[in-house]
Image: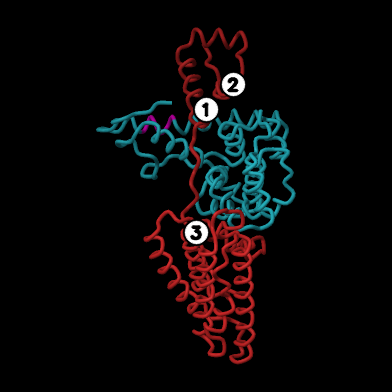
Chain colours: A cyan, B red
Amino acid sequence: METRATTTTDDGLIGLAADGDARAIRALYDRFSPRVYAVVRRIAGDDDLAQDWAQEAWIRAIRALPTFRGEARFSTWLHRIAVNAALQALRKAETRRRRETPLPAEPGEAHPSIEARPGDVLLRERIAWALDRIPARMREVLILHDVEGYTHEDIGEVLGIAPGTSKSQLFKARAKMRDLLGSLEAEESTRPDRGVETCSI
Amino acid sequence: MQHLTAETLARLVDEEPTEAERAHLASCAPCAKELAGYGAQTRALRSLPEILPPRGDWGVLEARLRSEGLVRDPGLLARLGLGRAPGWGGGAASLLCFGLGGFSGATLAARVGQAGPAEVGAEAEPAGTEALDGAEAAVRMAEQRYVEAMTRYRELAARSGGTAQIDPISRYAALEHLVLAGQAAVRQAPGDPYLNGLLASALAEREATARLVSSGEGWF
């Protein structure tokens, strides 16, 4: 469970940033932007969208900084803003319908190759590839639960759904991921002269 | 024998199986293997790395923050880290005042003849102050004079040329001189925090001006 772990240095930085200090805002950005960008990118499923949405998340966060009371960790507070911004943008962009049509792995479609790369890198690429191909609501739940560590209660609050619905979506999402990754593995195993380093999950 | 469904296996990643499910898993190798695969998939998701935002992302964000009035630049003292830094004295203040005076003068002289470097620089030159308080006051005064001079220039430029914009290209050129001087100084005294601060500040200003030049917006 997260406790209040914002350091004195962070407090000072956050205070300065809340006053609009450019250097303090830059310091916060340098420290937290990878985490913010990661969650937004995974929700967006697209680099260009992610860049816009992450910017929006930062604008919202900086705007809301004066209201930050330090009751939660700053990283948690910021993360929640990023998730909300990305989810809202996702709804606005009306990409939901498109994403709810799963994109099968078609022959010739760019997906992670197995050639001469360390197993963990390959695995991450495959995971990222599959994440971008599962329906939006399932992906949101899967990212929030399995990647970001949210509880089903937290997810219910963020997404406006019941915790039971969150669970149900999670299990479907895991199954969908497994299906996509399995098809990828099957495809790789049928290719000749492959298998320098396989990574079975 | 009927295998466990995909959703059941997905649930068993983090929930205990029922007695029936446990018994099935104990006797069904494919289902046990599949469950292990689900576990590996979930562990892989938990260990996904952070993702670095694209290069240049901060520049775009900074421009947006500025356009929304969410950013203010710190005062010169804070920018140089001098507000709470002990140990810098009259020499530093003198150099800074000289730099500010020269910079203001160069910028002004580039655009109007009325306010040359001598006029501005002479007033921003309370050098020789040895005490820290005196040095800080000197820097504040220099900063104030700089802002006043730029404000006056803007008014004059608006009156004479009908435009309230100061040429950012001239400012960029002046900053380029300052950067080159700062780099030379840092080469001579690489560990000097003041010189490094001054150079960093000049570099930041130059970068900001370059962005304004490229965006075509006014800078003052």
- Secondary structure mostly seen in the magenta stretch: helix
Judge left or right: residue A190 versus residue A167: left
Find disc 3 in the rendering and name its residue.
B194
Residue that extends furthest to the bottom in the rendered view of this protein: B160
- The residues bearing labels 2 and 3 have C-alpha atoms spaced at a distance of 56 Å
Vertical arrangement, residue B18 with respect to residue A48, above or below: above
Observer-side mark, 3 or 1, equals: 3
- The residues bearing labels 3 and 1 have C-alpha atoms spaced at a distance of 51 Å
Tag of residue B42: 1
Q: Mark 1 lies on which chain?
A: B
Find disc 2 in the rendering and name its residue.
B14
**Splitting the image into 4 quarters, where does residue B24 fall?**
top right
Q: Where is residue A200 in the image (x, y as percent from the top left)?
A: 40, 26
Q: Tell me where the magenta segment starts and ends, as one range.
A: A182-187
Disc nearer the start of the sequence (1/2): 2
- The residues bearing labels 1 and 2 have C-alpha atoms spaced at a distance of 10 Å
